[in-house]
Amino acid sequence: MSFQQNESIINGSLKGVIPLLALLTAFPALSTDMILPAIPLLAENWNQPISVVNLILVCFFVTYGFFLLFYGPISDRFGRRRPLILGLGVYIIASFLCAFATTAHMLILFRILQAAGAAASSSLSMAMTKDLFSGQERERILAHIAIIMAIAPMMAPVLGGWILLELSWPWIFFSQGLLGVIGLVGVLRFPETLPHASDAPLSRVMHAYGRLMLKPTYVVMVFVMSATLFPMYSFIAGSSDIYINGFGLTEQKFSYFFAFNALALMMGSFFCLRLTKYINSKHLMTTGFMGILLGGFILIMNRHQDPWGFALPMFLVTFSIGLSRPPSNNLVLEQVDKDVGSASSLLIFTYFTMGAVGMWLISLEWADKINTLGLIAFGCGSLILMAWLILQKKECLAPS
Protein backbone atom coordinates (compact mmCIF):
# COMPACT_ATOMS: atom_id res chain seq x y z
CA MET A 1 0.00 0.00 0.00
CA SER A 2 1.39 3.43 -0.95
CA PHE A 3 1.76 6.22 1.57
CA GLN A 4 -0.89 8.24 -0.30
CA GLN A 5 -3.37 5.44 0.36
CA ASN A 6 -2.19 5.23 3.97
CA GLU A 7 -2.63 9.00 4.31
CA SER A 8 -6.27 8.83 3.24
CA ILE A 9 -6.88 6.04 5.77
CA ILE A 10 -5.10 8.01 8.50
CA ASN A 11 -7.10 11.16 7.75
CA GLY A 12 -10.28 9.16 8.08
CA SER A 13 -9.33 7.74 11.48
CA LEU A 14 -7.51 10.51 13.36
CA LYS A 15 -10.02 10.28 16.19
CA GLY A 16 -8.92 6.71 16.73
CA VAL A 17 -5.22 7.47 16.61
CA ILE A 18 -5.25 9.65 19.75
CA PRO A 19 -6.37 6.83 22.10
CA LEU A 20 -3.88 4.48 20.39
CA LEU A 21 -1.01 6.96 20.83
CA ALA A 22 -2.05 7.56 24.44
CA LEU A 23 -2.09 3.80 25.16
CA LEU A 24 1.33 3.32 23.59
CA THR A 25 2.73 6.28 25.54
CA ALA A 26 1.20 4.96 28.78
CA PHE A 27 2.93 1.56 28.76
CA PRO A 28 5.75 2.68 31.11
CA ALA A 29 3.21 3.94 33.67
CA LEU A 30 1.10 0.79 33.33
CA SER A 31 4.19 -1.37 33.68
CA THR A 32 5.45 0.34 36.83
CA ASP A 33 2.49 1.72 38.76
CA MET A 34 0.33 -1.42 38.78
CA ILE A 35 2.98 -3.32 40.74
CA LEU A 36 3.67 -0.53 43.27
CA PRO A 37 1.12 -1.69 45.89
CA ALA A 38 2.73 -5.15 45.86
CA ILE A 39 6.33 -4.04 46.50
CA PRO A 40 6.17 -4.20 50.34
CA LEU A 41 4.38 -7.57 50.05
CA LEU A 42 7.01 -8.98 47.68
CA ALA A 43 9.79 -7.75 49.95
CA GLU A 44 8.18 -9.57 52.88
CA ASN A 45 7.35 -12.77 50.95
CA TRP A 46 10.82 -13.09 49.44
CA ASN A 47 12.62 -11.79 52.55
CA GLN A 48 14.34 -9.06 50.57
CA PRO A 49 14.92 -5.38 51.47
CA ILE A 50 12.89 -2.72 49.68
CA SER A 51 16.03 -1.54 47.89
CA VAL A 52 16.37 -4.97 46.20
CA VAL A 53 12.70 -5.32 45.26
CA ASN A 54 12.75 -1.77 43.88
CA LEU A 55 15.20 -3.06 41.26
CA ILE A 56 12.14 -4.31 39.37
CA LEU A 57 11.48 -0.60 38.81
CA VAL A 58 15.04 0.66 38.37
CA CYS A 59 16.14 -2.13 35.98
CA PHE A 60 12.94 -1.69 33.98
CA PHE A 61 13.67 1.99 33.44
CA VAL A 62 17.37 1.52 32.64
CA THR A 63 16.63 -1.20 30.09
CA TYR A 64 13.70 0.75 28.68
CA GLY A 65 15.88 3.78 28.10
CA PHE A 66 18.71 1.75 26.55
CA PHE A 67 16.44 0.06 23.99
CA LEU A 68 14.82 3.37 23.08
CA LEU A 69 18.08 4.28 21.39
CA PHE A 70 17.66 1.39 18.97
CA TYR A 71 13.96 1.63 18.15
CA GLY A 72 14.08 5.29 17.09
CA PRO A 73 16.70 5.06 14.31
CA ILE A 74 15.34 1.69 13.15
CA SER A 75 11.89 3.26 12.79
CA ASP A 76 13.39 6.04 10.65
CA ARG A 77 14.85 3.33 8.40
CA PHE A 78 12.00 0.78 8.25
CA GLY A 79 8.90 2.72 9.37
CA ARG A 80 7.00 2.80 12.66
CA ARG A 81 4.75 -0.27 12.40
CA ARG A 82 7.27 -3.12 12.21
CA PRO A 83 9.38 -2.09 15.26
CA LEU A 84 6.15 -1.48 17.20
CA ILE A 85 4.77 -4.92 16.35
CA LEU A 86 8.05 -6.58 17.36
CA GLY A 87 8.31 -4.63 20.61
CA LEU A 88 4.73 -5.26 21.67
CA GLY A 89 5.12 -8.98 20.94
CA VAL A 90 8.16 -9.15 23.25
CA TYR A 91 6.29 -7.13 25.89
CA ILE A 92 3.33 -9.52 25.89
CA ILE A 93 5.52 -12.63 26.27
CA ALA A 94 7.62 -11.03 29.01
CA SER A 95 4.53 -9.92 30.95
CA PHE A 96 3.32 -13.51 31.18
CA LEU A 97 6.81 -14.68 32.22
CA CYS A 98 6.78 -12.08 35.03
CA ALA A 99 3.58 -13.63 36.34
CA PHE A 100 5.38 -16.96 36.85
CA ALA A 101 8.44 -15.54 38.65
CA THR A 102 9.19 -17.26 41.97
CA THR A 103 12.08 -15.10 43.21
CA ALA A 104 13.02 -11.45 43.16
CA HIS A 105 15.90 -12.13 40.80
CA MET A 106 13.67 -13.97 38.33
CA LEU A 107 11.20 -11.09 38.36
CA ILE A 108 14.00 -8.56 37.80
CA LEU A 109 15.25 -10.60 34.81
CA PHE A 110 11.79 -10.88 33.23
CA ARG A 111 11.17 -7.18 33.88
CA ILE A 112 14.31 -6.40 31.88
CA LEU A 113 12.84 -8.40 28.98
CA GLN A 114 9.49 -6.66 29.43
CA ALA A 115 11.21 -3.27 29.25
CA ALA A 116 13.07 -4.25 26.07
CA GLY A 117 9.70 -4.81 24.38
CA ALA A 118 7.89 -1.83 25.91
CA ALA A 119 10.58 0.57 24.72
CA ALA A 120 9.08 0.49 21.22
CA SER A 121 5.91 2.19 22.40
CA SER A 122 6.75 5.62 23.86
CA SER A 123 9.41 6.82 21.42
CA LEU A 124 7.55 5.62 18.33
CA SER A 125 4.21 7.01 19.50
CA MET A 126 5.85 10.44 19.84
CA ALA A 127 7.47 10.02 16.42
CA MET A 128 4.04 9.11 14.99
CA THR A 129 2.68 12.32 16.53
CA LYS A 130 5.39 14.27 14.69
CA ASP A 131 4.51 12.36 11.46
CA LEU A 132 0.80 13.19 11.67
CA PHE A 133 0.60 16.67 13.21
CA SER A 134 2.54 19.94 13.18
CA GLY A 135 2.89 23.23 15.06
CA GLN A 136 0.15 24.23 17.48
CA GLU A 137 -1.98 21.30 16.40
CA ARG A 138 0.74 18.90 17.54
CA GLU A 139 1.03 20.76 20.85
CA ARG A 140 -2.75 20.42 21.30
CA ILE A 141 -2.63 16.70 20.43
CA LEU A 142 0.25 16.15 22.89
CA ALA A 143 -1.85 17.80 25.59
CA HIS A 144 -4.84 15.57 24.71
CA ILE A 145 -2.59 12.50 24.87
CA ALA A 146 -1.12 13.69 28.18
CA ILE A 147 -4.63 13.96 29.66
CA ILE A 148 -5.63 10.49 28.48
CA MET A 149 -2.36 8.83 29.47
CA ALA A 150 -2.53 10.44 32.93
CA ILE A 151 -5.43 8.08 33.59
CA ALA A 152 -2.87 5.23 33.49
CA PRO A 153 -0.81 6.25 36.56
CA MET A 154 -4.03 7.34 38.28
CA MET A 155 -5.83 4.02 37.76
CA ALA A 156 -2.90 1.58 37.56
CA PRO A 157 -2.10 1.38 41.32
CA VAL A 158 -5.83 1.28 42.12
CA LEU A 159 -6.22 -1.68 39.75
CA GLY A 160 -3.11 -3.24 41.25
CA GLY A 161 -4.58 -2.83 44.75
CA TRP A 162 -7.87 -4.39 43.70
CA ILE A 163 -6.05 -7.30 42.06
CA LEU A 164 -4.05 -7.87 45.27
CA LEU A 165 -7.26 -7.76 47.29
CA GLU A 166 -9.26 -10.17 45.12
CA LEU A 167 -6.57 -12.31 43.42
CA SER A 168 -2.76 -12.21 43.78
CA TRP A 169 0.21 -10.25 42.44
CA PRO A 170 0.86 -12.46 39.33
CA TRP A 171 -2.49 -11.32 37.94
CA ILE A 172 -1.05 -7.80 37.71
CA PHE A 173 1.29 -9.05 34.99
CA PHE A 174 -1.42 -11.10 33.29
CA SER A 175 -3.38 -7.83 33.04
CA GLN A 176 -0.38 -6.04 31.55
CA GLY A 177 -0.05 -8.79 28.95
CA LEU A 178 -3.70 -8.29 27.99
CA LEU A 179 -3.16 -4.54 27.61
CA GLY A 180 -0.20 -5.34 25.38
CA VAL A 181 -2.48 -7.46 23.19
CA ILE A 182 -4.93 -4.54 22.89
CA GLY A 183 -2.08 -2.22 21.84
CA LEU A 184 -0.82 -4.76 19.30
CA VAL A 185 -4.27 -5.10 17.73
CA GLY A 186 -4.48 -1.29 17.45
CA VAL A 187 -1.09 -1.08 15.72
CA LEU A 188 -2.00 -3.91 13.31
CA ARG A 189 -5.18 -2.05 12.32
CA PHE A 190 -3.43 1.28 11.74
CA PRO A 191 -1.35 2.05 8.62
CA GLU A 192 2.23 3.27 8.44
CA THR A 193 2.60 6.98 9.34
CA LEU A 194 6.14 7.69 8.14
CA PRO A 195 5.91 9.48 4.76
CA HIS A 196 9.40 8.63 3.51
CA ALA A 197 11.63 6.05 5.17
CA SER A 198 15.37 6.67 5.14
CA ASP A 199 17.35 4.83 2.47
CA ALA A 200 20.58 4.89 4.50
CA PRO A 201 22.26 1.51 5.12
CA LEU A 202 21.37 -0.04 8.47
CA SER A 203 25.03 0.21 9.51
CA ARG A 204 24.74 4.01 9.33
CA VAL A 205 21.34 4.36 10.99
CA MET A 206 22.84 5.00 14.42
CA HIS A 207 24.80 7.96 13.01
CA ALA A 208 21.63 9.98 13.56
CA TYR A 209 22.59 10.40 17.21
CA GLY A 210 25.89 11.98 16.19
CA ARG A 211 24.01 14.52 14.07
CA LEU A 212 21.62 15.26 16.94
CA MET A 213 24.48 15.79 19.38
CA LEU A 214 25.75 18.53 17.05
CA LYS A 215 22.51 20.48 17.65
CA PRO A 216 23.33 22.31 20.90
CA THR A 217 19.87 23.78 21.44
CA TYR A 218 18.23 20.39 21.06
CA VAL A 219 20.71 18.78 23.49
CA VAL A 220 20.29 21.50 26.12
CA MET A 221 16.50 21.41 25.80
CA VAL A 222 16.43 17.63 26.19
CA PHE A 223 18.38 17.75 29.45
CA VAL A 224 16.45 20.71 30.86
CA MET A 225 13.03 19.22 30.10
CA SER A 226 14.05 15.74 31.27
CA ALA A 227 15.06 17.08 34.66
CA THR A 228 11.43 18.05 35.31
CA LEU A 229 10.56 14.34 35.66
CA PHE A 230 13.26 13.60 38.25
CA PRO A 231 11.02 14.45 41.27
CA MET A 232 8.03 12.53 39.84
CA TYR A 233 9.92 9.28 39.34
CA SER A 234 11.55 9.64 42.75
CA PHE A 235 8.02 9.85 44.15
CA ILE A 236 6.92 6.77 42.18
CA ALA A 237 9.70 4.60 43.66
CA GLY A 238 9.38 5.96 47.20
CA SER A 239 5.61 6.38 47.52
CA SER A 240 4.68 2.83 48.59
CA ASP A 241 7.33 2.83 51.34
CA ILE A 242 6.26 6.29 52.52
CA TYR A 243 2.52 5.63 52.58
CA ILE A 244 2.47 1.94 53.60
CA ASN A 245 5.49 1.63 55.92
CA GLY A 246 5.73 5.30 56.93
CA PHE A 247 2.09 6.29 57.46
CA GLY A 248 0.79 2.73 58.02
CA LEU A 249 -1.77 2.77 55.21
CA THR A 250 -3.12 -0.40 53.56
CA GLU A 251 -2.20 -1.22 49.98
CA GLN A 252 -5.67 -0.14 48.87
CA LYS A 253 -5.52 3.23 50.65
CA PHE A 254 -2.04 3.80 49.26
CA SER A 255 -3.38 3.25 45.74
CA TYR A 256 -5.96 6.01 46.30
CA PHE A 257 -3.32 8.49 47.46
CA PHE A 258 -1.15 7.54 44.49
CA ALA A 259 -4.16 8.05 42.20
CA PHE A 260 -4.66 11.48 43.77
CA ASN A 261 -1.12 12.39 42.76
CA ALA A 262 -1.68 11.03 39.24
CA LEU A 263 -4.83 13.17 39.06
CA ALA A 264 -2.53 16.17 39.49
CA LEU A 265 -0.64 15.17 36.33
CA MET A 266 -3.88 14.90 34.37
CA MET A 267 -5.20 18.22 35.70
CA GLY A 268 -1.93 19.94 34.82
CA SER A 269 -2.14 18.67 31.24
CA PHE A 270 -5.83 19.64 31.05
CA PHE A 271 -5.13 23.18 32.21
CA CYS A 272 -2.28 23.36 29.70
CA LEU A 273 -4.68 22.38 26.93
CA ARG A 274 -7.18 25.07 27.94
CA LEU A 275 -4.77 27.85 28.79
CA THR A 276 -2.66 27.66 25.62
CA LYS A 277 -5.60 29.33 23.84
CA TYR A 278 -5.02 32.47 25.92
CA ILE A 279 -1.48 32.30 27.33
CA ASN A 280 1.82 31.84 25.55
CA SER A 281 3.16 28.29 26.04
CA LYS A 282 6.50 29.60 27.23
CA HIS A 283 4.79 31.46 30.09
CA LEU A 284 3.01 28.24 31.07
CA MET A 285 6.34 26.43 31.14
CA THR A 286 7.81 29.14 33.39
CA THR A 287 4.83 28.83 35.74
CA GLY A 288 5.19 25.05 35.81
CA PHE A 289 8.89 25.21 36.70
CA MET A 290 8.15 27.69 39.49
CA GLY A 291 5.46 25.32 40.80
CA ILE A 292 7.96 22.45 41.03
CA LEU A 293 10.30 24.68 43.03
CA LEU A 294 7.50 25.90 45.36
CA GLY A 295 6.14 22.39 45.97
CA GLY A 296 9.62 21.17 46.90
CA PHE A 297 10.05 24.09 49.32
CA ILE A 298 6.74 23.26 51.05
CA LEU A 299 7.76 19.59 51.36
CA ILE A 300 11.00 20.64 53.04
CA MET A 301 9.28 23.01 55.47
CA ASN A 302 6.24 20.82 56.28
CA ARG A 303 6.22 18.50 59.34
CA HIS A 304 4.36 15.69 57.49
CA GLN A 305 2.40 14.42 60.49
CA ASP A 306 -0.29 12.85 58.29
CA PRO A 307 -0.58 11.57 54.69
CA TRP A 308 -2.28 14.75 53.45
CA GLY A 309 0.63 16.88 54.68
CA PHE A 310 2.73 15.00 52.15
CA ALA A 311 0.11 14.46 49.43
CA LEU A 312 -0.89 18.11 48.93
CA PRO A 313 2.61 19.60 48.29
CA MET A 314 3.41 16.61 46.06
CA PHE A 315 0.16 17.34 44.19
CA LEU A 316 1.51 20.83 43.41
CA VAL A 317 4.81 19.38 42.14
CA THR A 318 3.09 16.87 39.86
CA PHE A 319 0.46 19.36 38.66
CA SER A 320 3.29 21.71 37.65
CA ILE A 321 5.01 18.90 35.75
CA GLY A 322 1.75 18.17 33.90
CA LEU A 323 1.32 21.87 33.09
CA SER A 324 4.78 22.24 31.58
CA ARG A 325 5.34 18.88 29.88
CA PRO A 326 3.21 19.11 26.67
CA PRO A 327 4.70 22.44 25.48
CA SER A 328 8.13 21.24 26.62
CA ASN A 329 7.92 18.09 24.48
CA ASN A 330 6.65 20.09 21.52
CA LEU A 331 9.42 22.68 21.88
CA VAL A 332 12.09 19.95 21.92
CA LEU A 333 10.65 18.34 18.77
CA GLU A 334 10.59 21.74 17.07
CA GLN A 335 14.39 21.78 17.25
CA VAL A 336 14.69 19.03 14.60
CA ASP A 337 13.32 18.60 11.09
CA LYS A 338 14.75 15.16 10.30
CA ASP A 339 15.88 12.05 12.24
CA VAL A 340 12.61 12.50 14.13
CA GLY A 341 12.47 8.91 15.38
CA SER A 342 16.00 9.20 16.75
CA ALA A 343 15.27 12.62 18.30
CA SER A 344 12.14 11.24 19.96
CA SER A 345 14.02 8.17 21.23
CA LEU A 346 16.85 10.27 22.66
CA LEU A 347 14.34 12.51 24.41
CA ILE A 348 12.45 9.61 25.99
CA PHE A 349 15.75 7.84 26.78
CA THR A 350 16.89 10.88 28.75
CA TYR A 351 13.50 11.05 30.51
CA PHE A 352 13.78 7.49 31.71
CA THR A 353 17.47 7.68 32.54
CA MET A 354 16.65 10.61 34.80
CA GLY A 355 13.75 8.57 36.16
CA ALA A 356 15.95 5.56 36.90
CA VAL A 357 18.47 7.74 38.76
CA GLY A 358 15.64 9.31 40.75
CA MET A 359 14.23 5.86 41.61
CA TRP A 360 17.64 4.61 42.71
CA LEU A 361 18.28 7.73 44.78
CA ILE A 362 15.03 7.59 46.74
CA SER A 363 15.43 3.81 47.32
CA LEU A 364 18.49 4.41 49.52
CA GLU A 365 18.07 4.18 53.29
CA TRP A 366 17.17 7.82 53.98
CA ALA A 367 16.12 8.78 57.50
CA ASP A 368 13.37 11.03 56.08
CA LYS A 369 12.35 10.20 52.52
CA ILE A 370 9.75 12.97 52.39
CA ASN A 371 12.37 15.61 53.18
CA THR A 372 14.63 14.00 50.55
CA LEU A 373 11.83 14.26 47.97
CA GLY A 374 11.41 17.92 48.90
CA LEU A 375 15.11 18.58 48.38
CA ILE A 376 14.98 16.80 45.01
CA ALA A 377 11.97 18.83 43.82
CA PHE A 378 13.37 22.13 45.13
CA GLY A 379 16.82 21.51 43.62
CA CYS A 380 15.49 20.39 40.24
CA GLY A 381 12.95 23.21 40.12
CA SER A 382 15.63 25.80 40.84
CA LEU A 383 18.06 24.47 38.22
CA ILE A 384 15.37 24.03 35.56
CA LEU A 385 13.93 27.51 36.09
CA MET A 386 17.37 29.10 35.95
CA ALA A 387 18.34 27.23 32.77
CA TRP A 388 14.97 28.01 31.15
CA LEU A 389 15.27 31.74 31.84
CA ILE A 390 18.79 31.75 30.38
CA LEU A 391 17.57 29.92 27.25
CA GLN A 392 14.78 32.45 26.76
CA LYS A 393 17.11 35.38 27.30
CA LYS A 394 19.47 34.08 24.62
CA GLU A 395 16.49 33.58 22.26
CA CYS A 396 17.86 30.25 21.03
CA LEU A 397 14.60 28.32 20.89
CA ALA A 398 13.84 28.55 17.18
CA PRO A 399 13.78 25.32 15.17
CA SER A 400 17.19 24.34 13.82
Image: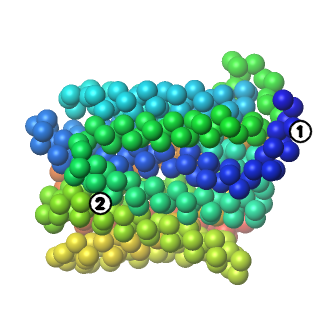
| Image-based side of 138 in relation to 3, left or right | left
The local crowd at label 2, few if under 14, some if 14 to 19, many if 20 or more residues have their Cα within 10 Å, is many
Which is more toward the observer, 163 or 272? 163
The way the protein has been coloured in the rendering is: rainbow
Q: Position of residue 259 (x, y in %)?
A: 36, 64
Residue at the outermost right position = 4
Q: Amino acid at mark 1?
A: Gln
Position of 217 relative to 291 (above/below):
above
Question: Which quarter shows the N terminus?
Answer: top right
Q: At x 47% / y 42%, what residue is drawn?
A: 179
Q: Which type of secondary structure does the marked residue at label 2 adopt?
A: helix
| Image-based side of 18 in relation to 168, left or right | right
Q: At x 25% / y 77%, what residue is drawn?
A: 309
Q: Which type of secondary structure does the marked residue at label 1 adopt?
A: helix
Q: Are marks 2 and 1 in contact (CB under 8 Å)?
A: no
Q: Amino acid at mark 2?
A: Ser
Q: CA distance from mark 2 to mark 1?
A: 46 Å
Which is more toward the observer, 241 or 373? 241
Q: Determine which quarter of the picture holds residue 248.
A: bottom left
Q: Which residue is mark 1?
A: 4
Q: At x 35% / y 38%, what residue is drawn?
A: 173
Q: Position of residue 155 (x, y in %)?
A: 40, 58
Q: Which residue is mark 2?
A: 255
Position of 154 relative to 203 (above/below):
below
Position of 327 relative to 202 (above/below):
below
The local crowd at label 1, few if under 14, some if 14 to 19, many if 20 or more residues have their Cα within 10 Å, is few
Q: Is residue 328 visible?
A: no
Q: Which mark is residue 323?
A: none
Q: Determine which quarter of the picture holds residue 9.
A: top right
Which is more toward the observer, 137 or 388? 137
Residue at the outermost front position = 166
Q: Position of residue 287 (x, y in %)?
A: 55, 76
